[in-house]
Amino acid sequence: MEIRKASSADVDGVFALVEQLSDTYEVDRASFDAAYADALKDPDHSVLLVAEVDGRVAGYALMIVSRLLYTRVDSAQIQELIVDEALRGQGIGSRLVAAVEDICIQRGLNQLTVASSRTPAFYDRLDYRSTADFLKKVFFSHRD
């Protein structure tokens, strides 16, 4: 397994992983392509990593970096972490999180946060602790 920065060549593999969320989210290829291009465009504020297994994308992590008003240095948040359903339980997600953490340490970031409603036990095992509730208000749905 190799963890590396994503490239434009990984777009189809990452999209295939996003499609695994279609039971929860409407997946639109044009919107995805625009968001993917944005994620690659500004590596200072957006880090997209992929896990490659046997020549294919098996997982990815998207981290956003920003300056919060109350911190002295930048902060980061894992926005998305998806591992292929068929390959879960093999350490791919843990390796992606470790790679994100390494980038945070190299950049001298103050903190790394993650909001997770589906897999809090996964993050508990990686020594993440709940410090706040994550609340969401939906204004409209893209589902027809």
Image (cartoon, rainbow, N blue to C red):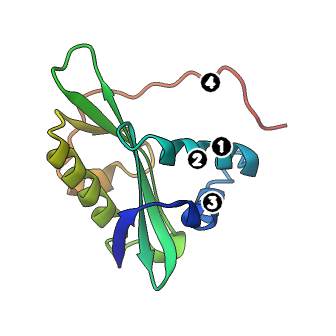
Residue 51 lies, with reference to residue 72, above or below; the image says below
**What amino acid is labelled 3 in the image?**
Phe
- Residue at mark 4: 138
Contact check, label 1 and label 3, Cβ < 8 Å = no
Residue 12, compared with residue 48, is above or below; it is below
**Can you give x and y, in whole percent of width and height, for residue 99 in the image?**
26, 59
* Relative to 63, residue 141 above or below: above
Q: Do the residues labelled 1 and 2 touch (CB within 8 Å)?
A: yes
Please state the horizontal and vertical placement of residue 36, each as a whole percent of the image. Answer: 58, 48
Residue that numbered label 3 is attached to: 15
Residue annotated with mark 1: 34
The residue lying toward the viewer, choosing from 129 and 33, is 33
Residue under label 2: 37
Q: Which of marks 2 and 4 is nearer the N terminus?
A: 2
Which residue is located at x 66 percent, y 47 percent? 32
Q: What residue type is labelled 2?
A: Ala
Residue type beneath disc 4: Val
